[in-house]
Image (cartoon, grey):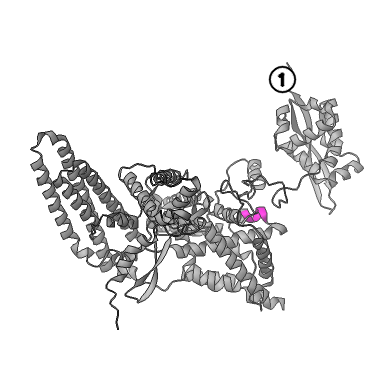
């Protein structure tokens, strides 16, 4: 039943989640969340209204955004700030770099590797992988027989040409910094966005750097993407192409 | 003819690190000697580790390499020692930060698989992650190398060490025996840490039980208890031996220290035993009562199902859709509870991620798409000059008087930036010193600077507060080009002399 106490518990949990993004399993509030069913119900409703989602993992209780959320997130802020025609390709490129990293990070995790700090993906590996991915996208786009939507073809063309001509790194780089003139700088830009949200830890070395997925990221990737139920949502999101094409014809 | 591989798998895995030591780096004339050099470095790192000496960061290891090179009569250049340490930590091109990878033959599967390992890894306990200071320690593979080069190899590493310690005590080498015992303690502590981590891991991801059993060997569970009893016996033996030596009065101090160490080792060993048994208990409980946790469910994986099969094949209908997918991973930002104008400033003028903010080569002067286009100050100044003249003359000026006649009104309205400056004056009062003119990002200060540059009389505006005040009830209305109306409350700017500076 709904009662004042549950409302208060729910509010407290939500506030803490907004504040910390994820709460450790040992946290008392997480215990409350698991115990108090009506608080969970209240939270579920609040999330629905505000366009957020609470995920319960083995190690953390997470709060993430959904598309069209009432709140801003690193993604929406980045989008708002740089959403102008000439920068759009930069935005899409950074977005794709995130996916490249996620796909690399999810293969790197083997059950035997207990030390999370050893699970990093080096920037050079990401650059190499991005080279491959953008080339593959571009090739598909060139001989595209409707695999890609028009909008995506245009975006891929822009990204491919932008990325292709960039230097990998400055010849003499002093520190690991964000810039959009080298591949290294762009990869760091993408990773920094993740780091600011507590999703990766960046190890910096003299000649390179490495992004280590944190437990929070691993858990979120697992909960959000390795999930049969959500897969259909995601599939729908990506597969809208066919309908789009039909409209164009 | 069937080939008898005879546990070639485990032998191969044990030898792989030795075969890989010192390979994959270009060191020129050092090539024939590089393995010895690397071994010496690893031994020294081990020595430091044992003594809890934290001089194990990359620069310190490079310095150590220099010393080793000098010791062996090689030229010790900075580049050389840098390359050697990089080659010890990473395989191949150090920019890729790769682990060492060599093939081994999996006998069960009858196929070649990849054996991945490192020689050095970061020690979590002593590294300072916030400050990006990494302290390196040896990995299990490097320990093996060290123990193997001792010509003593046994299943359990505790055995080797305690055996060596025993031999040393027998032969009367106390100093060394103490050192060995210290190492033994560290080994036990390491194993304790490992078991602790394992217990967390088992609860987090029960499936690792399967790989863990494979990793430690089948008989591990059965023999664990008997092994510990054996260990205890061995320590008792050591203690008896020590108490015999105890009769020699000139060695009293050394012997009592040794006994202390032996006891410490045994206590730690007991803790380890408890942990191991606890973990086995958890494991059995999971296998018995929660076995469904171990099933491999057919699962969607991001890499295969979403990335490779969907995105790479079909892309996104609209490239912007990628942000929908991405936002599923990000947390909402905490809403701002600060004053509105401050938050607008944060939101509008400070990008969430400033892509150019941190550029290292100061080349932000070229074609930056992310910076605000430079304002053309000339027309702006022309508009604002009369305003400030009037302000200087009368000490006050009304907005409506500026926009009185239609002609000047349209000029103003055509210059968006000039109008925007008015709004900036509303926010807060302006007080400018000569110092501020040099370094301020405030557009109003910039305006003053341009004005002073043109006409020195404007210097009078310095060190005075320029304050805005609303004129209640009066409005100024505009009609914009696209016929939208705009009504703003009339306000006035006036000067407030700062008495301090004028006195």
Q: Is residue B236 magenta?
A: no
Which image quarter is the N terminus of chain B in? bottom left
- What is the x, y in percent for residue A105? 48, 62
Q: Relative to residue A187, is residue B145 drawn left or right?
A: left
Chain holding disc 1: B
Q: Residue at x 69, y 47 (%)?
A: B364
Q: Residue at x 81, y 43 (%)?
A: B376
Q: Relative to residue B262, is residue A32 drawn left or right?
A: right
Res B290 quadrant in image = bottom left
Which image quarter is the C terminus of chain B in? top right
Q: Residue at x 7, y 38 (%)?
A: B247
Q: Relative to residue A205, is residue B181 drawn left or right?
A: left
Res B156 quadrant in image = bottom left
Q: Report the magenta residues as a range.
A: A78-82
Seen in the picture, residue A208 relative to B66 is either above or below; the reply is below
- Is residue B283 visible in the rendered image? The answer is yes
Q: Is residue A81 magenta?
A: yes
Q: How many marks?
A: 1
Q: Which residue is mark 1?
A: B501
Q: Residues within 10 Å of mark 1 (few under 14, many from 20)?
A: few
- What is the x, y in percent for residue B88? 42, 54
Label 1 sits on a secondary structure element that is helix
- Is residue A2 visible in the rendered image? The answer is no
- What is the x, y in percent for residue B331? 52, 54
Q: Relative to residue B272, is residue A1 drawn left or right?
A: right
Q: Residue at x 39, y 42 (%)?
A: B55
């Amino acid at each position: 039943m709904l009662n004042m106490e549950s409302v208060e518990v729910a509010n407290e949990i939500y506030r803490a989640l907004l504040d910390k993004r994820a709460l450790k399993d040992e946290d008392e509030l997480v215990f409350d969340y698991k115990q108090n069913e009506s608080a969970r119900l209240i939270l579920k409703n609040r999330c629905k209204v505000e366009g957020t989602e609470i995920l319960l993992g083995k190690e953390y209780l997470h709060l993430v955004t959904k598309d069209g959320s009432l709140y801003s997130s690193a993604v929406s802020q980045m989008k708002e700030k740089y959403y102008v025609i000439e920068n759009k390709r930069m935005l899409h490129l950074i977005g794709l770099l995130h996916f490249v990293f996620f796909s690399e990070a999810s293969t790197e995790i083997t059950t035997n590797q207990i030390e999370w700090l050893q699970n990093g993906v080096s920037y050079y590996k990401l650059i190499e992988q991005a080279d491959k991915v953008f080339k593959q996208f571009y090739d598909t786009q060139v001989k595209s027989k409707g695999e890609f939507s028009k909008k995506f073809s245009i975006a891929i063309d822009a990204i491919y040409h932008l990325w292709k001509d960039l230097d990998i790194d400055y010849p003499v780089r002093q520190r690991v910094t964000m810039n959009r003139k080298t591949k290294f700088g762009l990869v760091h830009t993408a990773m920094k966005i993740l780091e600011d949200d507590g999703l990766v830890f960046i190890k910096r070395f003299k000649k390179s750097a490495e992004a280590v997925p944190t437990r929070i990221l691993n858990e979120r990737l697992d909960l959000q993407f390795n999930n049969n139920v959500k897969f259909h949502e995601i599939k729908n999101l990506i597969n809208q192409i066919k309908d789009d094409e039909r409209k164009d014809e | 003819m069937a080939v008898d591989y005879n546990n070639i798998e485990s032998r191969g895995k044990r030898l792989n690190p030795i075969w890989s030591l010192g390979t994959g780096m270009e060191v020129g004339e050092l090539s024939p000697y590089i393995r010895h050099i690397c071994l010496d470095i690893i031994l020294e790192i081990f020595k430091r580790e044992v003594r809890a000496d934290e001089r194990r960061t990359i620069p310190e290891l490079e310095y150590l390499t220099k010393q080793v090179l000098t010791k062996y009569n090689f030229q010790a250049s900075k580049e050389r020692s840098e390359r050697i340490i990089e080659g010890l930590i990473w395989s191949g091109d150090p920019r890729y930060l790769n682990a060492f990878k060599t093939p081994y033959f999996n006998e069960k599967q009858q196929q070649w698989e990849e054996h991945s390992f490192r020689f050095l890894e970061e020690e979590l306990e002593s590294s300072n992650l916030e400050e990006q200071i990494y302290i390196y320690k040896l990995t299990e593979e490097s320990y093996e190398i060290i123990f193997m080069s001792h010509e003593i190899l046994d299943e359990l590493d505790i055995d080797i060490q305690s055996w060596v310690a025993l031999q040393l005590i027998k032969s009367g080498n106390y100093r060394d025996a103490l050192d060995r015992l210290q190492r033994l303690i560290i080994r036990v502590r390491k194993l304790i840490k490992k078991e602790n981590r394992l217990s967390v891991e088992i609860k987090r991801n029960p499936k690792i039980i399967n790989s863990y059993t494979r990793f430690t060997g089948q008989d591990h569970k059965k023999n664990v208890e008997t092994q510990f009893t054996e260990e205890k016996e061995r320590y008792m033996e050591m203690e008896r031996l020590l108490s015999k030596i105890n009769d020699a009065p000139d060695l009293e101090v050394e012997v009592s220290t040794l006994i202390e160490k032996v006891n410490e080792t045994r206590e730690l060993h007991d803790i380890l035993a408890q942990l191991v048994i606890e973990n086995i208990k958890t494991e059995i409980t999971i296998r018995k009562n929660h076995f469904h946790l171990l099933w491999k469910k057919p699962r969607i994986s991001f890499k295969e199902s979403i990335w490779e099969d969907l995105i790479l094949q079909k892309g996104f209908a609209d490239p912007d859709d990628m942000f929908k997918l991405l936002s599923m991973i990000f947390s909402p930002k905490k809403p701002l509870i600060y004053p509105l104008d401050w938050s607008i400033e944060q939101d509008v003028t400070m990008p969430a991620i400033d892509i150019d903010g941190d550029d290292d080569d100061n080349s932000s002067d070229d074609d930056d798409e992310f910076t605000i286009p430079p304002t053309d100050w000339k027309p702006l100044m022309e508009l604002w000059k009369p305003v400030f003249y009037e302000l200087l003359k009368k000490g006050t000026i009304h907005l409506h008087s500026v926009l009185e006649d239609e002609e000047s009104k349209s000029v103003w309205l055509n210059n968006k930036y000039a109008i925007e400056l008015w709004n900036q004056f509303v926010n807060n009062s302006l007080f400018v010193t000569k110092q501020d003119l040099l370094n301020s990002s405030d557009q109003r200060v910039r305006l003053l600077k341009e004005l002073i540059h043109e006409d020195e009389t404007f210097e009078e505006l310095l060190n005075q507060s320029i304050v805005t005040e609303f004129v209640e009830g009066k409005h100024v209305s505009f009609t914009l080009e696209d016929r939208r109306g705009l009504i703003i409350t009339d306000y006035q700017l006036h000067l407030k002399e700062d008495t301090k500076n004028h006195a």
